[in-house]
Image (spheres, helix red, strand yellow):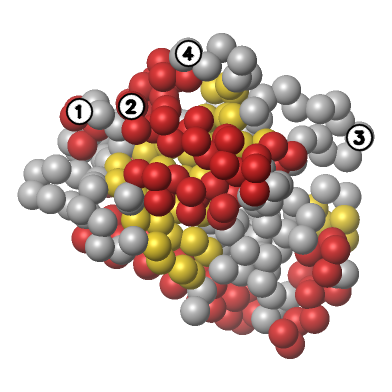
Amino acid sequence: MAYTLLRPDSKRPIVLCCDHAGYAVPEELANLGLSDQQLKQHIGWDIGAADVTSYISQALDVTAVFSKYSRLYIDCNRPPASLGSIPEQSDNIIIPGNANLSPEDKIGRAERSLWPYHQALSAALARHWQGDIAPVLISIHSFTPALQGESLRPWQYGLISGHDRRLADGIIAQFRRYPEICLGDNLPYSGFDVSYTLNGHGLSSGIAHIGIEIRQDLIDTAEGVAHYGAVLADVLQCALEDGSLYRVQYH
């Protein structure tokens, strides 16, 4: 199975997703030529993101969809066949198992991982339409504290949005209750650059959507997940009270 579902029968019109929840690689590909340690670094998955997604799913009683396979096997948040879809190098680390792949190899990976995950996410969103009440999509990611050769990123959380700012603006307003938090708005990544999941499921259908990034060194322990998950759950619970979010709006 390429994905995991939590609380599929939730009655709330809210769906979480985690594109980089796992670091699995099919056994026959031998970790893509990487060591176990390398595969479990930030290049292989979003450290802590699955745990935070699970925390939020339980705290808010909402459905969550998780990918299983490593982003190095195929990245579920990149257009298939794009340069970033199956990277041959990530943060200056060569990925031997991704070199010289045939079109058939790439199609096989998409059919095994990317398409089943996105079909499961589409189905979850479809189940949560309630008449003219549209679901909301929240994508949870995590980011490395610093890329090789770069300085520490100061943000604890980052919001990723594009043309639809409904959720972003509401969440920013709620984070003002936490002055100790350094919040990035389209930082460290911009929704105008990397948003395959949000564009494909959110922007195209007019439902409110947001990507949320959390710095990995803050959520790589159970204590960190509980603390930063609780803050985020509180912020989201309040922001999601806005009834206008549950209406289709094209941008």
Q: CA distance from mark 1 to mark 4?
A: 21 Å
Q: Which sits earlier in the primary sequence, circle 3 or circle 2? A: 3
Task: Give the number of the disc on residue 176.
Answer: 4
Q: Residue at x 35, y 44 (%)?
A: 60
Vertical order, 181 against 84 (above or below):
above
Q: What's the amino acid at mark 1? A: Ser
Task: Give the number of the disc on residue 238.
Answer: 2
Vertical order, 220 against 75 (above or below):
above
Label 1 sits on residue: 244
* Residue 236 percent coordinates (x, y): 39, 32
Q: Nearer the viewer, residue 200 or 31?
A: 31
Q: Residues within 10 Å of mark 4 (few under 14, many from 20)?
A: few
Task: Give the number of the disc on residue 149.
Answer: 3
Residue 185 seen in the current view: yes
Q: What's the amino acid at mark 3? A: Gly
Q: CA distance from mark 4 to mark 3?
A: 32 Å
